[in-house]
Amino acid sequence: MRLGIVSDIHGNLASLDAALALMGPVDEVLCAGDLVSGFRFSNEVVARLREIGARVVLGNHDLDVLGPHGERVRESPATDPDLLRWLGQQPVRLDTRIGGRRLTMFHAAPEEPFEYVYAESPRMRLWRDLAADFVIYGHTHYGLAHREGDTLVVNPGSAGQPRDPRNGFRSSFAVLDTASGEVRLEVYDDPIYRPRPQ
């Protein structure tokens, strides 16, 4: 199966739509969290991911909106209650089989503390013990495809709030072929956030 993977959209529908168009035909779309940004709900981003049947896990920004401090945004007349309810039904971690392979997806880490984990982080070495062929995560806004033992770890970067100086602060997504284990990280110009000069 061919999976399109996005994360850290932060309310940027134009960038999400650009990623979905650029990834081409995929069997399924996965989103590793942070559909919204801060305490601002995004009806448009949540609606788009629901509309295409994406599998979604909640990020820290999503949990902020759904948590005790998000009451104001939840009660705002601008927030669609049906979309808010759908977002609240999404898990913080997904353990599933796709294309006969074991896949685990979470936003920052499989358990607290939810820190920024990079390829060189000692914590990532523990993810080889998750009994997954593929681990998908986000949070860092840095794209990577990294092998830990028999586990391929994929972070698609950010499809909405680019922060990675290695790619010129451009947005990114990933496409994973579950049969071959090949992953393509694609960088593109975000319609909202222009690349910074290097």
Image (cartoon, rainbow, N blue to C red):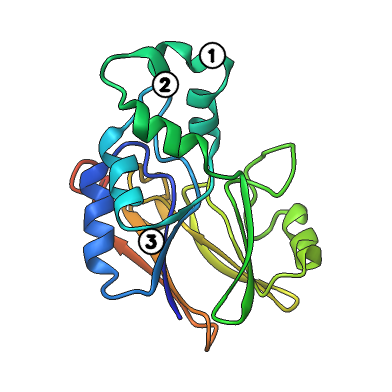
Q: Which tag, 1 or 2, sits closer to the chain's start?
A: 2
Residue nearer the viewer, 68 or 130: 68
Eyeballing the image, is 56 above or below 150? above
Residue with the mark numbered 3? 173
Residue nearer the viewer, 82 or 92: 82
Dot 3 falls on a residue whose secondary structure is strand
- Distance from disc 1 to disc 2, alpha carbons, whole Å, reads 9 Å
Residue with the mark numbered 1? 69
Residue furthest bottom in the image: 180
Q: Position of residue 164 (x, y in %)?
A: 42, 50
Q: Which tag, 1 or 3, sits closer to the chain's start?
A: 1
Residue nearer the viewer, 102 or 115: 102
For disc 2, the neighbor class at 10 Å (few under 14, some 14 to 19, many from 20) is some
Please report the residue visible at 53 percent of the width from the left and 51 percent of the height from the top: 138
Dot 1 falls on a residue whose secondary structure is helix
Does residue 183 appear to the left or right of 75 in the view shown? Answer: right
Dot 2 falls on a residue whose secondary structure is loop
Q: Which tag, 2 or 3, sits closer to the chain's start?
A: 2
Q: Position of residue 29 (x, y in %)?
A: 40, 63
Q: Mark 2 is on which residue type? A: Phe
Q: Position of residue 167 (x, y in %)?
A: 37, 58
- In terms of image quadrants, where is residue 188? bottom left
Please report the residue visible at 77 percent of the width from the left and 63 percent of the height from the top: 130
Q: Mark 1 is on which residue type? A: His
- In terms of image quadrants, where is residue 26? bottom left
Q: Are marks 1 and 2 in contact (CB under 8 Å)?
A: yes
Tell me the number on the disc at residue 39: 2
- Distance from disc 2 to disc 3, alpha carbons, whole Å, reads 24 Å
